[in-house]
């Protein structure tokens, strides 16, 4: 197999991992006002992802860094082209990240309310916009003969892309609800289960529409298989949560996201960013890539260190496997009130 | 303003801002890890209280370091896409490796440390914060390797067919001689910064009314070792800085000349303590100098020739005047902004020296566990955190502005690096948004930090060891 193909696959894996992990962080963040009616309930929700959200977020930094290293032309065109959406995602990630750490630092209702809003908006914006971004990559955007994006901002808000955004939004909401059902106890757990079914069915409809549309446009046999696995996993997850089998349910949405993203990359291959302009050039795994030497170095580094990372990251989830209920939340050690 | 100017302002603002918090993270993570190790080893609960107190301050700082770091990675692609295309084959790899090796390590083990007090054995829990610290060091290594390549490009070739720079020797990039001296210089400066922070906070606690005698002894346990670290790290910063100066003279002579406002080549060259230049920065009007010292600092020999700005500019016009690749070069303008490089260089050094001097003073004044009285020493201690903090900023402004007009010295200019299809409007939206957001967050962070410093170290609750399965206690810590 070509090294460029290997790295296309590795970057796909990084995005698959990112969305499967940060996806439930976004879901939990968006469900904060829905499932967290009291202060302690909200803290239960936040603490399900407290130890792991930051490690999950690193997946996107490595995905971006790997794209820069392995396909510099793709990195350059994508990040300079999708400028304003990326800026919005950045702002969202910044305020969300700070909110987790700062929220409990003052014992003051309006302080907490502001940070709660930061968590919710900071989760909603990326959940929507990542889907919009990936849909646009698949659809093809105006790239000129130099591979530069020349399409402007509103070009990115087309129906296909917006549908993709709604799909990721609903999928992450479902995934978040599944995670909450798995990690909490008491009334929140029950409410999360019910919500997971409702939102999950909506997500399934949109996913079938979007993935179906994608398959018709640019799909291959491989992507079709992946999309079918995704749909089955999602529906299986919804069925599992209805019968209270929360572990299987979470696995269902986890696999659904992984398979869905895999399918998108399979549908994209061998392009990395196709153009919609007749006079432009498609960015492909071959013309956008780094040199074979660089890819070789990166491969050695990845093969050695990625397994180590996976081991210690999964260990974290094992350490914090206990379910959290309202009575587990300690009273704040008299945090300063201030403002 | 065009996109280039806006992009440059944004890079400067976001990077200086990010690097206010990062050195504290690097230094303080080691110090907090040290406190926790001392507690595990000795069982003295004062170490645990210090761990928790400075740990909380560490976390307030760490959070903002992380979120401002995300911008850094995205920014290369967003504002500097031509740079990314041209050097991505070399520059992208250290960034990706930084993420894989360092960021995962830091974030994962910090989560374990914050939440794992009742889930991990004391030794394992302490190991977590050490791993976070190691993560910060790894992060520094890889990002500095990337930056050092910009200062002194090695291990690459220019491929005229692809029109870009291509990596030929990864080891050369990882062990670039600029990198080998910049890494210790930066990390030691970070240790200074974290330690200076502890000195300032601990000294204030020592002196305020309301701190019990018992607590005063506890803060002294933090204060004195921290002052020692400032001193020893400061020595290391000075030594590595000296070596760095010599390497800089060799590989970036224009930067050394600019640092010294040395307009004309001199043999031997005098070191300027104070120079006033003409308004356009093109010549010297008045100077106080130490004879031969610049020759010595720049090369190790007190009689050596040191090249001046004007000679170098003519040399570069000859060397780079020929256009090797139309897209990546812009002729002329080889001189950095002299007043800026001259003063940032001196401020960096001056602040470092001041920190070391104050550290000595404080060590002397607290000998045999005395609590020093007096206004002056209190102000010196309160100033301490800011000295290496801004020394870092001036150092980075110096080294980046001293490399201008190049992004990659001798290979690619800043003017050619900017994203060609990003409009000034988009760039301005980004600059204004990020600057305003950072301003608000800084305000929040500082106030929060001051609140928790003011609160002082908490008394310990009943210590909780690891829970056994089946026990349904509240969490030891929750957001």
Image (cartoon, grey):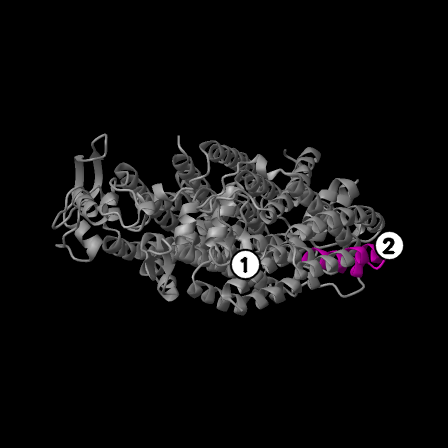
Asked whether residue B337 is drawn in magenta, I would say no
In the rendered image, residue B121, in percent from the top left (x then y), is placed at 65, 66
In the picture, measured across the screen, residue A38 lies left or right of residue B152, that is right
Q: Residue shown at 83%/58% (left/top)?
A: A240
Mark on residue A242?
2
Magenta segment? A234-258
Q: Residue shown at 39%/35% (left/top)?
A: B5
Tell me the quarter of the picture where residue B247 sits: bottom left
Residue nearest the viewer, comparing B102 with B191: B102
- Res B130 seen here: no
Mark on residue A65?
none
In the picture, measured across the screen, residue A72 lies left or right of residue B325, that is right
Element under disc 1: helix
The image quadrant where one finds the N terminus of chain B is top left
In the picture, measured across the screen, residue A320 lies left or right of residue B87, that is right
Q: Mark 1 lies on which chain?
A: B
The tally of labels here is: 2
Asked whether residue A246 is drawn in magenta, I would say yes
Residue found at the very far front of the displayed protein: A278
In the picture, measured across the screen, residue B19 lies left or right of residue B182, that is right
In the rendered image, residue B410, in percent from the top left (x then y), is placed at 28, 50
């Amino acid at each position: 197999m070509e090294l460029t193909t290997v790295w296309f696959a590795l970057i796909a894996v990084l995005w698959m991992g990112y969305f499967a992990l940060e996806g439930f962080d976004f879901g939990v963040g968006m469900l904060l006002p829905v499932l967290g009616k009291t202060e302690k309930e909200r803290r239960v929700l936040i603490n399900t992802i407290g130890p792991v959200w930051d490690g999950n977020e690193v997946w996107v930094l490595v995905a971006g860094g790997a794209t820069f290293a392995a396909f510099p032309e793709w990195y350059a065109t994508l990040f300079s082209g999708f400028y304003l959406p990326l800026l919005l995602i950045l702002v969202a990630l910044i305020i969300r990240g700070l909110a987790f750490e700062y929220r409990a630092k003052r014992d003051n209702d309006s302080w907490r309310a502001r940070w709660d809003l930061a968590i919710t908006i900071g989760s909603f914006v990326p959940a929507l916009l990542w889907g919009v971004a990936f849909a646009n990559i698949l659809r093809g955007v105006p790239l000129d003969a130099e591979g530069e994006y020349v399409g402007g901002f509103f070009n990115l808000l087309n129906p296909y892309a917006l549908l993709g955004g709604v799909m990721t939004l609903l999928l992450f909401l479902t995934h978040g609800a599944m995670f909450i059902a798995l990690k909490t106890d008491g009334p929140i757990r029950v409410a999360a289960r019910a919500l997971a079914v409702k939102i999950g069915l909506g997500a399934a409809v949109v996913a079938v529409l979007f993935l179906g549309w994608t398959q018709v446009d640019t799909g291959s046999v491989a992507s079709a298989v992946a999309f079918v696995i995704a749909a089955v996993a999602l529906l299986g997850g919804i069925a599992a949560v209805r019968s209270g089998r929360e572990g299987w349910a979470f696995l269902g949405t986890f696999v659904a996201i992984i398979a869905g993203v895999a399918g998108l990359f399979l549908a994209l291959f061998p392009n990395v960013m196709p153009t919609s302009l007749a006079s432009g050039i498609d960015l492909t795994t071959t013309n956008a890539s780094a040199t074979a030497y660089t890819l070789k170095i990166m491969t050695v580094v990845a093969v050695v260190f990625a397994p180590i990372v996976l081991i210690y990251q999964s260990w974290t989830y094992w350490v914090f496997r206990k379910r959290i209920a309202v009575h587990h939340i300690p009273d704040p050690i008299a945090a300063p009130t201030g403002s | 303003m065009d996109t280039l100017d806006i992009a440059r302002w944004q890079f400067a603002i976001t990077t200086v801002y990010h690097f206010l918090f990062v050195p504290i993270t690097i230094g303080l993570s080691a110090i907090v890890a040290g406190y926790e190790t001392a507690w595990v080893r000795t069982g003295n609960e004062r170490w645990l209280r210090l761990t928790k107190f400075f740990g909380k301050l560490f976390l307030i700082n760490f959070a903002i370091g992380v979120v401002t770091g995300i911008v850094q990675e995205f920014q290369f692609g967003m504002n500097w896409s031509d740079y990314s295309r041209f050097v991505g084959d070399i520059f992208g790899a250290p960034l990706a490796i930084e993420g894989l090796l360092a960021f995962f390590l830091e974030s994962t083990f910090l989560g374990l440390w914050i939440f794992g007090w009742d889930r991990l054995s004391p030794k394992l829990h302490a190991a977590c914060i050490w791993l976070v610290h190691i993560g910060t060091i790894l992060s520094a290594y890889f990002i500095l390797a990337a930056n050092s390549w910009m200062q002194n490009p090695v291990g690459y070739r220019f491929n005229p067919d692809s029109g870009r720079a291509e990596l030929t020797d990864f080891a050369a990039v990882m062990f670039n001689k600029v990198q080998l001296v910049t890494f210790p210089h930066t990390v030691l400066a970070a240790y200074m910064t974290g330690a200076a922070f502890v000195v300032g906070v601990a000294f204030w606690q020592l002196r305020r009314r309301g701190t019990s005698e018992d607590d005063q002894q506890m803060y002294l346990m933090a204060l004195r070792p921290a002052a020692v670290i400032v001193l020893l790290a400061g020595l290391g910063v000075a030594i590595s800085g000296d070596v760095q100066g010599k390497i800089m003279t060799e590989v970036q002579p224009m930067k050394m000349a600019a640092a010294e406002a040395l307009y004309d080549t001199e043999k031997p060259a005098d070191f300027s303590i104070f120079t006033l230049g003409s308004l356009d920065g093109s010549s010297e009007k008045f100077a106080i100098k130490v004879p031969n010292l610049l020759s010595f600092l720049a090369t190790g020999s007190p009689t050596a020739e040191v090249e001046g700005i004007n000679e170098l500019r003519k040399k570069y016009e000859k060397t780079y005047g020929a256009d090797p690749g139309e897209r990546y070069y812009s002729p002329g303008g080889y001189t950095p902004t002299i007043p800026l490089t001259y003063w940032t260089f001196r401020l960096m050094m001056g602040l470092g020296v001041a920190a070391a001097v104050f550290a000595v003073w404080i060590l002397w004044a607290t000998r045999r566990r005395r609590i020093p009285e007096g206004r002056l020493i209190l102000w010196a201690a309160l100033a301490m955190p800011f000295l290496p903090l801004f020394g870092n900023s001036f150092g980075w402004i110096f080294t980046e502005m001293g490399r201008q007009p190049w992004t990659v010295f001798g290979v690619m200019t800043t003017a050619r690096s900017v994203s060609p299809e990003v409009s000034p409007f988009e760039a301005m939206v980004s600059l204004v948004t990020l600057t305003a957001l950072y301003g608000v967050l800084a305000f929040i962070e500082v106030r929060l930090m001051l609140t928790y410093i003011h609160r002082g170290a908490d008394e310990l609750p009943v210590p909780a060891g690891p829970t056994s399965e089946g026990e349904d206690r509240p969490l030891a810590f929750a957001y």
